[in-house]
Amino acid sequence: MSQRTFSIIKPDAVKKGHAGAILAEIEKAGFKIVSIKKVSISKAQAEGFYYVHSERPFFGELTEFMSSGPIFPMVLEKENAIADLRKLMGATDPAKAEEGTIRKQFAASIGENAIHGSDAEETAAFEIGYFFAGYELK
Ligand code: GDP
């Protein structure tokens, strides 16, 4: 059954001009792009998005980074989308990411790691709703 997930092309990848190449990888892997936009978010908006990480030592760095430049939030659809996107992204730390993954190819560090992808159905639902209104998801 077809499933939706949420992803963000992060500020580092947008700044380096890798957004198009990352989208090509995503489409090549069989995902349909349901919705996509280019936005810049405030630190407070990044804090709301990443509230589950608020107790982590890197929370300040993460939210500073995510509000440092334009990002491409998007909703993707395919069978097994959540797990398959996580596999395509690769490990959080690009040094540990498998060959051919997006983070292996485009990420510079564990913090500036090119792409976000939801880790479960409930988080995908929250994250889609955080960035997109119903009329944008047809
Ligand atoms: P993900 O699901 O692979 O994105 O990883 P996590 O959910 O564990 O962490 C969320 C995001 O926080 C990561 O994608 C990184 O951008 C950031 N992050 C995780 N660990 C670190 C860290 O040790 N230092 C910094 N600066 N950022 C981190």
Image (cartoon, grey):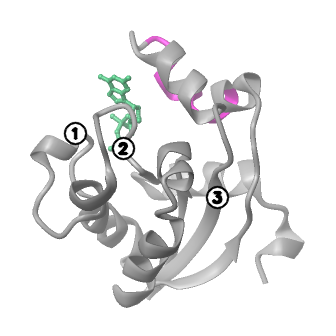
Mark 3 near ligand 1 (CB under 8 Å)? no
Quarter containing ligand 1?
top left
Q: Which one is earlier in the sequence, the residue at label 3 or at label 1? A: 3
Quadrant of the image occupied by residue 11:
top right
Q: Is residue 101 left or right of residue 6?
A: left
Nearer-N-terminus badge (2/1): 1
Q: Which residue lies under the disc numbered 1? A: 93
Asked if residue 93 lies left or right of residue 115, the reply is left
Label 2, on which residue?
Answer: 113
Closer to the chain start, of discs 3 and 2, is 3
Q: Is residue 79 visible?
A: no
Segment tinted magenta in the rendering: 48-55
Q: Is residue 119 left or right of residue 95?
A: right
Q: Is residue 49 located in the magenta-colored stretch of the structure?
A: yes
Q: Say which element carries label 3.
A: strand
> Most extreme residue toward the right, as rendered?
135
Q: Quadrant of the C terminus?
A: bottom right
Q: Note whether ligand 1 is within 8 Å of mark 2.
A: yes
Q: Which numbered disc, 3 or 2, marks the residue closer to the eye?
A: 2
According to the picture, the residue beneath numbered tag 3 turns out to be 73
Q: Within 8 Å: ligand 1 and the Cβ of disc 1? A: yes
Determine crowd level at label 2: few under 14, some 14-19, many 20+ residues with C-alpha closer than 10 A.
many
Instruction: Say what amino acid the circle numbered 3 marks.
Output: Pro
Q: Return the x and y of residue 53 as percentages of the image width and height.
A: 47, 23
